[in-house]
Image (tube, grey):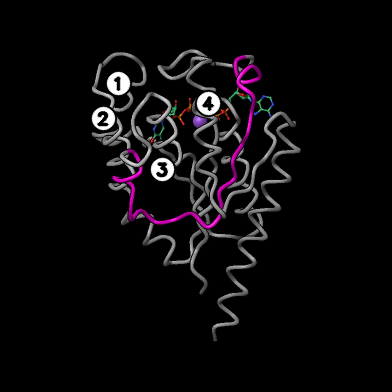
Amino acid sequence: MARGRFILLEGCDRAGKSTQCAMLVKALQERGHSVELCKFPERTTTIGQMIHAYLTNSKELDDKAIHLLFSANRWEAMQAMKRKLEQGTHLVVDRYAYSGVAFSTAKGLDLKWCMNPDKGLVRPDLTLFLDLPTAEAERRGGFGEERYEKRELQEKVREVFLRLKAKEWVVVDARKSIEAMHQEILNEAEQKIREGEQAKEDAL
Ligand code: T5A
Ligand code: NA
């Protein structure tokens, strides 16, 4: 059996990542794939609860301390994620290390310092970057409720994200309708899954 594919959705706040992750998981399941959703921050763990308290402004933390907690929250999920990929399950992941670096760097921390704690995490096979202008994000439901949902910071975050753009990235225009984005994301994900299956056949 081919290794599962790691499909990451990244982007600024309100770009539609969670909406698209749920739709992608459902569509892949309907097509007979074994697929699971992961999300970061994963707020249910002890570390995740500390992150949640920080994001909802009920707890103050040093910028470096919260950065390391976000990274630790990925590391604590790593063994389980690797096991699932090895078993052939595809992972659809809602935010990851790119968010970690983009937000902390936008707050003023050094980019290289921010990248260090995530070194060695399993690498995504496909990163779909949902790109949405900040002015558009502000018009969407719920913007402004959490700590980082402020225009100036979000614009810096977007700039850092675009500096981090790696070769596995595909940029998706998040101004489009939910359905149009879904079709594009599903096509990219299915293509990546086919490539993985083909590579396995070629190796035999
Ligand atoms: N963070 C995260 C760090 O600082 N470091 C890290 O290491 C990590 C992992 C919380 C914060 O943590 C920071 C980044 C964040 O500031 P979160 O839990 O992922 O991260 O944040 P959420 O609030 O859950 O999610 P977002 O704000 O990022 O929103 P989404 O998931 O991008 O958007 P979604 O799908 O919830 O949609 C938002 C609204 O827009 C509508 C939806 O119906 C909804 O109302 N919408 C659309 N409207 C029009 N057109 C479309 N195409 C639409 N798609 C969705
Ligand atoms: Na979300």
* Residue at 45% across, 41% down: 98
Are the residues flagged by discs 1 and 3 in contact, CB closer than 8 Å? no
Residue flagged by tag 1: what amino acid is it? Ala
Question: Closer to the N terminus: mark 4 or mark 1?
Answer: 4
From the image, tell me which residue sits under label 1: 53
| Left or right of 67 on screen, residue 177 | right
From the image, tell me which residue sits under label 4: 13
Q: Nearer the viewer, residue 159 or 148?
A: 159
Question: Closer to the N terminus: mark 1 or mark 3?
Answer: 1
Question: Closer to the N terminus: mark 4 or mark 3?
Answer: 4
Residue flagged by tag 3: what amino acid is it? Ala
Residue flagged by tag 2: what amino acid is it? Lys
Looking at the rendered image, the disc whose residue lies closer to the viewer, 1 or 3, is 3
Are the residues flagged by discs 1 and 2 in contact, CB closer than 8 Å? no
Spatial CA distance of label 1 from label 3 is 20 Å
Where residue 79 appears, x then y in whole percent?
31, 56
Looking at the rendered image, the disc whose residue lies closer to the viewer, 4 or 2, is 2
Residue flagged by tag 4: what amino acid is it? Asp
From the image, tell me which residue sits under label 3: 97
Q: Which residues are magenta?
A: 114-138
Quadrant in which the C terminus appears: bottom right
**Is the residue indicated by label 4 positioned so its CB lies within 8 Å of ligand 1?**
yes
From the image, tell me which residue sits under label 2: 64
Looking at the rendered image, the disc whose residue lies closer to the viewer, 1 or 2, is 2
Looking at the rendered image, the disc whose residue lies closer to the viewer, 4 or 1, is 4
* Residue at 36% across, 21% down: 55
Where residue 122 appears, x then y in whole percent?
39, 56
Secondary structure, mark 3, is helix
